[in-house]
């Protein structure tokens, strides 16, 4: 799969970028197929080859999120901008993000309960009574063992 993305060039502390078409798996500073323009964020300069960008998109190349937003700003493609930094822009996105956060907090990683029990901390309480009975029985057995050992001494 092809990707249209930035390739950083320029001196230290003076970034400028080339827009290039490259395979998605290639490293950030790796080989590319074609240069489609450049962008200098410090001077706000840019030069884009509109025809070549449209050609590569028609061939299946996917622009990165930042490139997608830049192409919309320049009027090369139409659509809505993509949130690049993960900050929600609208109320709907904020609500969706809040729902996802609530879902993620309810899900615990596998093996977390075992880890907590091994450390000697209190284990999370199960919801049903059937699950608590074996745990209480196991604790009672351990208590009996400890008291029997203490009596023997």
Image: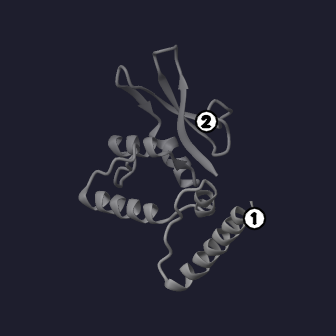
Label 1 SS? helix
The answer to whether residue 152 is left or right of residue 125 is right
Residue sticking out furthest to the bottom: 130
Q: Horizontal and vertical percent for residue 72?
A: 36, 46
The answer to whether residue 111 is left or right of residue 57 is right
Give the mark, 2 or 1, whose residue is nearer the N terminus.
2
Between residues 109 and 85, which one lies in front from this camera angle? 109
Between residues 37 and 89, which one lies in front from this camera angle? 89
Q: Which colour scheme is used?
A: one colour
At 45% across and 46% down in the image, what residue appears?
65
Q: Horizontal and vertical percent for residue 109?
A: 57, 61
Residue 96: quarter of image: bottom left
In which quadrant is the C terminus drawn? bottom right
Label 2 SS? strand
The answer to whether residue 151 is left or right of residue 49 is right
Up the image or down, 80 lies above or below 14; here it is below
Q: Which mark is residue 34?
A: 2
- Residue highlighted by disc 1: 152
- Alpha-carbon distance for marks 2 and 1? 83 Å
Residue 76: quarter of image: top left
């Amino acid at each position: 799969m092809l990707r249209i993305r930035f390739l950083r060039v320029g001196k230290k502390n003076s970034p400028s970028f080339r827009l290039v078409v490259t395979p998605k798996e290639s490293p950030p500073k790796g080989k590319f197929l074609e240069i489609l323009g450049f962008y200098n964020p410090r001077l706000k300069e840019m030069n884009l080859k509109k025809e070549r960008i449209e050609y590569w998109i028609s061939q299946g190349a996917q622009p990165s999120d930042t490139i997608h937003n830049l192409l919309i700003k320049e009027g090369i493609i139409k659509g809505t901008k993509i949130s690049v930094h993960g900050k929600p822009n609208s109320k709907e996105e904020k609500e969706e993000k809040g729902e996802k956060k609530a879902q993620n907090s309810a899900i615990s990683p596998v093996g977390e309960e075992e880890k907590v029990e091994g450390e000697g901390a209190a284990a999370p309480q199960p919801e049903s009574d059937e699950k608590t009975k074996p745990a209480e029985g196991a604790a009672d057995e351990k208590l009996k063992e400890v008291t029997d050992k203490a009596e023997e001494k």
